Image (tube, rainbow, N blue to C red):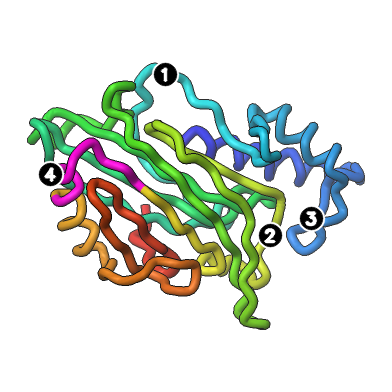
Amino acid sequence: MLQRIIAFFISVFLAIGSFLGLPCAKRETDTSGLTDEEMEQALKLLSYKLDANGIFYIEHPRWAECHIYDLSNPEIQLVYGTVHVEFGYGGKDWLVQMWKGRYGLVLLGGEIGVYNRPAGQTAEPYCSALEEEELLLAMDIYQHNFKTGETEYLFTRGPQPDWWLTGFVPGSFYEWNKKSEIIMVADIQFPNEEMLRTFETSFVAAGFTQGSPQHDTPETYTVSGSNLKFCWQYIDQGA
């Protein structure tokens, strides 16, 4: 949730800049006009950081952040699809949620979040998994141009133990608010096969089928030991 609020403020920042005629404020169709330095300074001002490969991300606090709601809204330039997978394991209800799309006017990217709560306590919000409960997460993000049929690799994040893996790069949609342009190919390593299998049941119910997940085989997944790899492009369950 935090990164989506920050993305909103990026949009406000750029909108104000555009009104004042600042050179760093560009419309979605002209984000390439920002220099790398201008982009980096603006995003660092809004709490984004750069990893060793030059990919922007949000460094989240270790204290439990609760999953309250999503904030996808074209009016404030947050346009993303999401898949949420709920399942029970080890005396807790779990939620693994993925997001991908446009964050603010200037960023494309994706996220994988891991949350849980005491089993059956539906009145309580899901909160971030504890450090010892983190899953090994990794993701590759691509962008597909439906007009030309070409797919461009954007970046990789992970693998790393985490409860919230994020990654963003400067960019914009080829077509207005076309969320399915962004493709996520990701790996989730579970601590054991039992947990993976309970996740898999809900994952299949969300619309994924066994196959050979690559950037051009959407909504497929494969299992190897306690690792699940998937490609996600079209499914969008909404907030």
The reply to whether dot 2 and dot 3 touch (C-beta < 8 Å) is: yes
Q: Name above or below for residue 118 compared with residue 10.
A: above
Q: Position of residue 73 (x, y in %)?
A: 52, 53
Q: Residue at x 12, y 38 (%)?
A: 89
Q: Quadrant of residue 24?
A: top right
Q: Residue at x 59, y 71 (%)?
A: 144
Point out the residue furthest to the bottom here: 148
Q: Is residue 50 magenta?
A: no
The reply to whether dot 4 and dot 2 touch (C-beta < 8 Å) is: no
Q: Within 10 Å of the Cα at label 3, are there few (<14), some (14-19), or many (20+) other Cα atoms?
A: some
Q: Nearer the viewer, mark 1 or mark 3?
A: 1
> Which sits earlier in the primary sequence, circle 4 or circle 2?
2
The reply to whether dot 2 and dot 1 touch (C-beta < 8 Å) is: no
Q: Residue at x 34, y 68 (%)?
A: 220
Residue on which the image places disc 3: 31
Q: Which residues make up the magenta segment? A: 188-197
Q: Nearer the viewer, mark 4 or mark 2?
A: 4
Q: Residue at x 64, y 32 (%)?
A: 48
Residue on which the image places disc 1: 62
Q: Quadrant of the N terminus?
A: top left
Mark 4: which secondary structure?
A: helix
Amino acid type at mark 1: Arg
Residue on which the image places disc 4: 194
Q: CA distance from mark 2 to mark 1?
A: 31 Å
